[in-house]
Image (tube, rainbow, N blue to C red):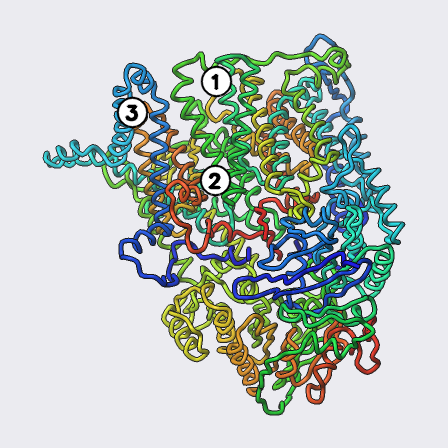
Amino acid sequence: MTTTTAAPIRVKEAGYVSPRRQRVMGIVFLALATMIWAFFSRTTTGQMVTTFVMSPGGAVATPDLVFKTLPFLNVLATISAVIGAYQLVRGFHGRTNTMLGILAGFFVIAFLAWGAADKSLNLAGLLKVAVVRAVPLTLGALSGILCERSGIINIGIEGMLLAAAFTSTVAASLSNLWVGLIVAILTGALFGWVLAVFSIRYKVNQIISGTVINIFATGMTSFLSAKFLQKYQNLNSPGQFPTWEIPGLSKIPFFGPILFSHNLFVYGVFILLIVLTIALFHTKWGLRLRSAGEHPKAADTLGINVNRTRYMATILGGMIAGFGGAYFTLGSVGRFDEVMTAGRGFIGLAAMIFGNWMPTGALGAGLLFGLADSLAGKLTILRIPIPPKFLEMAPYIVTMIVLAGVVGHTSPPAAEGTPYEKE
Amino acid sequence: MTPVLELRGITKRFPGVVANDHIDLKLEAGEIHALLGENGAGKTTLMNVLYGLYSPDEGEIIVKGKRLVPKSPSDAIAAGIGMVHQHFMLVPVFTVTENVMLGDEYVTKGGLLDRKRAAARIREISDKYNLFVDPDAYIKDTPVGIQQRVEIIKLLFREADILIMDEPTAVLTPQEADELFKIMGNLSKMGKSIIFITHKLREVLEFSDRITVIRGGKVMGTTTPAEANQNLLASMMVGRDIELDVNKKPAQAGEKVLEVTGLTVADAHNHLVVKGVSFDVRAGEILGIAGVQGNGQTELVRAITGLMHPVEGKISILGQDTTRAAPKEIIELGTAHIPEDRQKDGLVLPYPIMDNLVLNTFYKPPFAKGAMLQEEPIRENANQLVERFDIRTPSIETQVGSLSGGNQQKVIVAREFSRPIKFLVASQPTRGLDVGSIEYIHHRLVEKRDDGCAVLLVSTELDEIMQLSDRIAVIFGGKIIKILPAKGTTKEEIGLLMAGVDTETQKPVSQPVPVG
Amino acid sequence: MTDNKEMTPPPADNSVKPEKAAKPNALNIFLEEVSRNSLTVTILAILTGLLLGGLVAVLTTETVYSSFRTSFGLGFREVFRVFGITYSALFTGSFGQPDVIRAAIASRDWQQINTALSPFFESLVQSTPYILAGLAVALGFRVGLFNIGAEGQIFVGALAAVWAGTRIHGLPPIIHAPLALLVGGLGGAIWGFIPGWLKAKTGAHEVINTIMMNYIAFRLSEYLLTGFLKDPTKAHPISATVDTAAWLPRLFPNPNRFHVGFFIALIMAYLVYLLLFKTTLGFQLRTVGLNPNAARYAGMSIVKNTVLAMALSGLLAGLAGANEVLGVNRNLGVAFSSGYGFDSIALALLGNSHPLGVVLASLLFGFLRNGALRMQLQAGIPIDIISIMQAAILAFIAAPGIIRTIYRLKEPKEESGSPLLTAARKGQAQ
């Protein structure tokens, strides 16, 4: 945006990092190292021992991890400081963001080790919950990615999740879980179609289109729930998808129970992640879809129907949100409650931005936000003097920081939010 | 031998304009056919008709003996017609391969994109025509010259044999342009037929096989480089039937009001478009900047008026350094600006006339008292100016957006001239106006000059420059290649300079001499 | 061409219309005018939205189906009965019951009149936060900014007002109440300032940032209400009651909750009107909103005006929160969430981002909301029906094409869509 004052033509190589950003990141790295030392090391005594429980309570038992807290923290702090110094002096260039991720991971681990000093923390349980919490966030983000990559901003994810959660409950209560799931996906498709009609046919501002969907879905589901679900409890007892242990994989020590002992929705996220990554970046379909979101006019001159592409992407995006909506009822609590999505759709939107509009990024962001969520529940048990609510704010704050371009650089699809009109 | 492409009586009308008026054109196989004309002559419209982006009101298109009615670019592509647009149609975040195969993808048996095979094909094409394009590079990291070759590869990849190139050298450096013409030569040798649209005489004379000149939507004639010369083409291209006379006294040039030294400005895409320009404008004179659209005039004006910050160099107005000053400071020094795009920059179209007339003085008495706007003085001001500047409007509350172009421009002129100014920047002040309004505005500009105001006039209309200026600076490729007194200079001379040909040496100015 | 479209004036300003060549009869001209008029579309959008709500109510009433099973005539009668009860409950709930009012007036007993009229005043009470929040969003729209963070700003405003109302003691009411209100407004202003500053300085889109700020505000309120601001005598997270000195005075005895906040909201609407249309600052704000290029050309600062507009927008929303806390609830619980923030987008659009329009739209929504409460009690129709109506109205206003298609209206001379939104800036360079 601030190109007017920038330096003259410069061909940027892939992974180019400006000197200023190199320095800023170096300082950020060093700050993380200092924080590990100042907050954690200095408040730990030499005798303290951290215990991480390494199995979430499943059949496979992995021995607990027990280690001395202080040396561990000091090692982490030192490695972080070395990395920071290297970044400041030489720079990691294309790997700067990877290093940032590693250091952020160190910080979280140090925090956990410190929090569990002389206590025991069920690390495996924590991570397993994080994976579960990540499901709706990641699905919301994937829905957003599909829409926005084609050029349609979708801030109606929240409404789509909620509507699908409702319809899936009723449908599953009346017949079975699978019908409920299909109805949820169809509900999402319907809302996606509505978003597309508003945004493409009527050229309504896409933020407004999404807001209409959110208000309508909240109103409609609350209305129908108050009217019927409270009176006819049998409409609100859909049951839940059972946990499916994946044979073999779930037996892997530590990771097995965390990743491969879940219900359909977690696996759905994994499968969608793979399918979407391939579809978006390795098929003709994806290439065309992305071109509609980046440079619709170029796509048009090559005979691609921009608006049809956008309709398709938005409807498919709605379907993913619909699948995510079913998670809340069929995959989590087995019941519909008013406004039960509680802003998860918006965190999904944040995860999409944080993950830089990439499916893998969305999962990464979803897991990180899920971890924050999961950890918030453990803080009081560990007697860590940080209000859990502050940890719950973290996803929003980091999204704002990322969006401001302080730490990283986001690259949204260039043409998102603008209707395409032929001349 | 039948031509590969024939246009017969193509007519395209837009509300109020006939962009193409019964245009006939024949393109022979393997020839490079230049379509020469000023901006707005209707060249691009014609090519958009051919490419299926517009449908013609009359006339027909015959490709290789068969009638073609292109409804969309796909039809044109299928008929073997390809177009390199003036603004490249490339997705910056895609690789060269992805851009080239978009819409015509190679896929593997498994249904995945076959980037390898496509890249191999691109390499093959690149080698065949000496294009030196790396299929794996990202467009955003690729220089403009190479991007254009990617556009050409896009066409060759689709086996197009009729290539349309719209102002292909507009964004290129002279060296890149020379490379491009080499490539075009290769292409034509291999049997491709090329139409290239331009307004640069040098290119036409050196690199084309035949030349068709268009002016005002009509074909002025078709010739060959052997038969034509620069003077003939220049007069065919820029010739005017209506001569507007402006009576003016000799200039009484005073002190330097604007001083520009070594000014370099980059555009929004970070390309240097003004390159080390130096000049000055004195009180009581009009300095005309002549040049074809897109040679850096827009950015030059934006830098002078504070809307853009230069990369290098210095600007001073009335002795004050304004290189990095905000627009408001520059305005308050007594600068007036008639912007190039009146609807985008100069006016708030939904506002009534009365509000537009105080757009940059609203905070000063009598229009404001403290923080409050004073409606009465604003109305009174509007009534006076509407009268004085002959703005035709039902009322001063009429939205400016509903006025005609000429009256909109008068609103700007009225606003800028009604406050005490010492320096006036007028950028394309008469673009798109009727003859009456043009005359009116010319008259006012000279009046300002006679009042002792320094006037910087930027125009692509050669006649306007010739009639109004006291001195003329010709800008080409972001550099001012010559500053001459208006007296004793001929239109042909300026026309040649605008087309990048130095009149004294009669040699193309591929590397303009730095001025200052 | 697209640029021109963005600059098309708001549809309400039909000051110049090219004159018609032919002169058909007066009625036809009138119908033609009405058909093209955007006010017609607005009114039809509201009516259609209300009708849709009634339809939802009918379709979700079981007796309708059971009656149809008995006989067609009975079914129809049931449909009309449900329609009737829906709208009459909506009406009596928001205005009061005519016979009760008549009886009360006849009795000449002030208390009885007060009680009979209290539904009407309650509607005004419900309208008050709508007016303030609607003004917040409208102000943003006028400057080309999309503040969908009114909800969060309302929360922060409420928190700040509760802090001032429960932690400051010993001030006389004449100082304490305005102070608490002001503190609430400032809280909201800070919440609006942050995304405004980020937008102006880094280009970060205000839509995303205001959404993020919403959720930060929710978490913050949960934190404060379980800790710092919590009433220690209560088990659940709720603040202590605001000092009586900080209350916005109620004008009538119970059950009438009408308080001075309504007048404050009207005053704010008038002030916003003055600011936007009568001051030099407002001139700059509107210019930036309609044509940022021209604003820059004329020497106005985009950065300054953007930040200021978002802060002022937040201030208004903050006042809405403070108003609820100091005037109605007098304490703050976690369930304070109102949905005002999202509804206010509809209000601003419906009111064409003009303060007067916003006030009228807010009254409509306030009366609907209050009427819906009675609808819930009397007709068993959940209150959420108004969200459905509001969503429908918003959709029809935003996409006038739908209404024009339904009612076969003529296209306006220039298709303007919702100009205030299309005027929203795209990737504004600095």
Residue bearing mark 1: A170
Packing grade of label 2 (10 A; few <14, some 14-19, many >=20) is many
Q: Quadrant of residue C273?
A: bottom left
Q: Check residue C79 in the rendering and tell me which mark sits there, or answer none.
A: 3
Q: Chain of mark 3?
A: C
Instruction: Provide residue B469's location: percent of width, then percent of height.
Output: 64, 83
Q: Secondary structure at mark 3?
A: helix
The amino acid marked with disc number 3 is Val
Q: CA distance from mark 2 to mark 1?
A: 37 Å
Q: Residue at x 61, y 44 (%)?
A: A416
Classify mark 3: residues with Cα within 10 Å, few (<14), some (14-19) or many (20+): many
User: Mark 2 sits on what residue?
Assistant: C156
Count of numbered circles on the image? 3
Which chain does the numbered disc 1 sit on? A
Q: Quadrant of the C terminus of chain B?
A: bottom right
Marks 1 and 3 on same chain: no
Q: Nearer the viewer, residue B356 or A380?
A: B356
Q: Is residue C164 visible?
A: no
* Between B371 and A73, the one nearer to me in the picture: B371
Is mark 3 in CB contact (under 8 Å) with mark 2? no
Report whether mark 2 lies on the same chain as mark 1. Answer: no
